[in-house]
Image: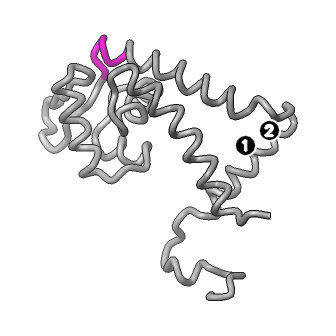
């Protein structure tokens, strides 16, 4: 049987190809769909929240937002009395593309789930959540220390 890391990478790559292909058809570059999805679900947010919610480095989010603002997908504004944060929101065009991306995400999900029964899909989602929680960084723990069970650990 193939190792877990390999199977997870294969699944991620296959799903990501479908999503990025759909995004490219809409004229979006990598990184933009994730931010559009976040803003559609969360509403106006600051760059730090977007970075955390999308699991992207803040500096990377900044450069993606610059392109998105240039392309008319988002607008950034200051709130009165708070000059430290710029608040990011979708423009009407950004909202339209976010809704189109939602369809791309749904089609990719349906294709990935097609060979599964409803119970298998539910179990897979539950197990992936457990994996994500288990892989989340823990305070005062190095990557090396968290390798319990490996021959190298």
Q: Position of residue 77 (x, y in %)?
A: 17, 28
Q: Nearer the viewer, residue 51 or 99?
A: 99
Q: Is residue 123 left or right of residue 88?
A: right
- Where residue 103 sits in the image (x, y, percent)? 54, 18
Q: Position of residue 4 (x, y in %)?
A: 70, 62
Q: How is the image coloured?
A: one colour
| Residue nearest the viewer, comparing 89 with 12 | 12
Real-space Cα distance between discs 1 and 2?
5 Å
At x 30% / y 11%, what residue is drawn? 92
Where, by quadrant of the figure, is residue 72 drawn?
top left
Q: Could you tell me residue 33's position as x and y percent?
A: 41, 31
Quarter where residue 112 is shown = top right
| 15 relative position to 76: left or right | right
* Quarter the N terminus occupies: bottom right
Any magenta on residue 65?
Answer: no
Mark 1 residue element: helix
Q: Is residue 80 left or right of residue 111?
A: left
**Part of the protein shown in magenta:** 90-95
Residue closest to the eye, 25 or 72: 25
What is the number of the mark on residue 62?
Answer: none
Residue marked by disc 2: 122
Question: Which residue is outermost to the bottom?
Answer: 152
The disc placed on residue 125 is 1
Q: Nearer the viewer, residue 145 or 111?
A: 111
* Quadrant showing the C terminus: bottom right
Residue drawn 63% across the image and 47% down it: 11
Q: Residue at x 72, y 43 (%)?
A: 125
């Amino acid at each position: 049987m193939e190792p877990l890391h390999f199977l997870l990478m294969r699944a991620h790559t296959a799903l990501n190809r479908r999503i990025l292909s759909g995004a490219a058809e809409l004229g979006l570059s990598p990184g933009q769909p994730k931010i559009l999805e976040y803003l559609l679900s969360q509403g106006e947010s600051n760059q730090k929240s977007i970075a955390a919610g999308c699991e992207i480095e803040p500096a990377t989010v900044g450069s993606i937002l610059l392109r998105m603002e240039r392309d008319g997908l988002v607008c950034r504004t200051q709130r009165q009395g708070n000059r430290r944060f710029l608040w990011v929101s979708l423009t009407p065009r950004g909202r339209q593309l976010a809704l189109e991306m939602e369809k791309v995400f749904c089609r990719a999900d349906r294709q990935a789930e097609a060979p599964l029964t409803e119970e298998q899909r539910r179990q897979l989602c539950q197990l992936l959540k457990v994996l994500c929680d288990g892989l989340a960084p823990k305070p005062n723990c190095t990557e090396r220390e968290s390798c319990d069970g490996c021959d190298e650990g």
